[in-house]
Amino acid sequence: MSQRQVLQVFEQYQRARTQFVQAVAELASRSQNIETLQNAGVMALLRPLLLDVVPTIQQTAALALGRLANYNDDLAEAVVKGDILPQLVCSLSEQNRFYKKAAAFVLRAVGKHSPQLAQAIVQCGALETLVICLEDFDPGVKEAAAWALGYIARHNSELSQAVVDAGAVPLLVLCIQEPEIALKRIAASTLSDISKHSPELAQTVVDAGAIAHLAQMILNPDAKLKRQVLSALSQIAKHSVDLAELVVEAEIFPVVLTCLKDSDEYVKKNGATLIREIAKHTPELSQLIVNAGGVAAVIDCIGSCRGTVRLPGIMMLGYVAAHSENLSMAVIISKGIPPLCTCLIEENEDHIKAAAAWALGQVGRHTPEHARAVAVANVLPILLSLYMETHSSEDLQVKTKKALKNILQKCTYLPALEPLLHDAPPNILKHIVGQFSKVLPHDSKARRLFVTTGGLKKVQEIKAEPGSLLQEYINTINNCYPEEIVRNLMLCSCWCSCALGMFNKFAVSFITEDCFSSYLITV
């Protein structure tokens, strides 16, 4: 055989390897092929190709492995058990930029599935190599490395601390200053993943100077970048008053309020989340948000969107209202109650309804004036209906019950309370009757209306345990009226209940009114 014929054998072998890895990489990009590839033993065949003498074959083999590992945790675990990670890490610092991106993709695909798989990446020494890649000249390599680090850090504080200890944070802060938008996005996302676990980790990000650079990008036209920037600032601000104040000092107000009108739903949601995480800490921070027009902006945002996008805004209003009477009144004056009430009616998810109920409870719990503002919006019957609905989740029932209690204990606006007398269960009824027992002894007009509307008659029908708090409230109400009227009313109520089968409701109504006529004239 001639030399050319000998070389042709090697060329054919190289072409075959190239065709194989390219075909596998292409097949692995479609989920319906994954199980067949796995059953065919593709992992064992790809592993030696990572050390192939041809760089393109190495890169394509890594890409195929990444796509397979990305599909599910079983395949990712196969990569770990096949001792593939040490090969990748070893080659990561030596190969060209294309291989580095493919290898970082494999590490990300493995690490995303579970803390255990992410820990396997840490144990094989990948973090130090990935951090070195953050200093690479090629922005694509930096992006791939930052992405892999983020997927490791997001699982728990221990893994996040490992990323910090490897020296990633200062380099990630440099990455968000690079001109490439894609690199900015991933670096901001990774800083968010690091910051979310604990105040100490968030402080590490702050100490690296991240806040100022993140705050400057709030108005960036790229929606995906704004999502990550707002998320990172939220994860920093949520931990403590000091960290929230540092975020505020970066002059994010009123700039961040423009995000609540963004066309991107996730920008709206993350913007509202950032405001919520700041508002929850202290009355002073909430007052700052009110002064900047934040409450009105959040209310407009709630009214313009649906679903989970509303949730952080709903909670933000609740946090603001919870702090003080004045802040709660700011929510009322800004017309915050109708949108919250709308959420109770429109939303399908119980956790969103529960948040709205909680927020309304915080608004109405301070004074009779606050409670009246909630009551006149017809919120109470809706809350009661949700509480009594058998399909409501346990959390929704707890939240609506607490909201009803908070509002009822302060509400002295009787026209809003009286309809509840007919439907409320005993544990709610005692709060309603309790409010009547506080108001009626001091208000003659209210006493008269309570008779004409049938409220007093309804009270006589309530079956209360002798000596109970509810019975005490009923006795207090009855003492506001002549004994003869109460006695006649009780007899009349008994007679009417017996007569329902014989007379229509107009006859019963006439009999009832006749029992009261002499009392109404004297009042």
Image (cartoon, rainbow, N blue to C red):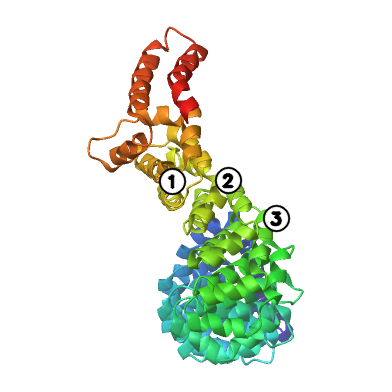
The outermost residue toward the left is 467
Q: Residue at x 71, y 79 (%)?
A: 8
Pair 2/1: label in front: 2
Instruction: Tell me the kind of residue under disc 3.
Output: Ser
> Is the C-beta separation of discs 2 and 1 under 8 Å?
no
Q: Which of pointers 3 and 1 lies earlier in the amino acid sequence?
A: 3
Task: Please state, as top left, top right, bottom left or bottom right, where the N terminus lies in the image.
Answer: bottom right
Q: Which of pointers 2 and 3 lies earlier in the amino acid sequence?
A: 3
Near mark 3 (Cα within 10 A), the count class, few <14, some 14-19 or many ≥20, is few
The answer to whether residue 189 is left or right of residue 77 is: right
Q: Is residue 300 visible?
A: yes
Task: Return the residue at label 3.
Answer: 304
Q: Is residue 373 above or below residue 88?
A: above
Instruction: Tell me the kind of residue under disc 1.
Output: Ser
Q: Which of pointers 2 and 1 lies earlier in the amino acid sequence?
A: 2
State how far apart marks 3 and 1 are (Cα).
26 Å
Q: Position of residue 30 (x, y in %)?
A: 63, 58
The outermost residue toward the top is 502
Q: Is residue 313 visible?
A: no
Instruction: Tell me the kind of residue under disc 2.
Output: Val
Q: In what element is the residue under mark 3?
A: helix
Task: Return the residue at label 1.
Answer: 393
Q: Residue at x 48, y 47 (%)?
A: 412
The outermost residue toward the right is 221
> Of the numbered discs in the image, which one, if any, rests on residue 376?
2
Q: In what element is the residue under mark 1?
A: loop
Residue sitting nearer the eye, 168 or 98: 168
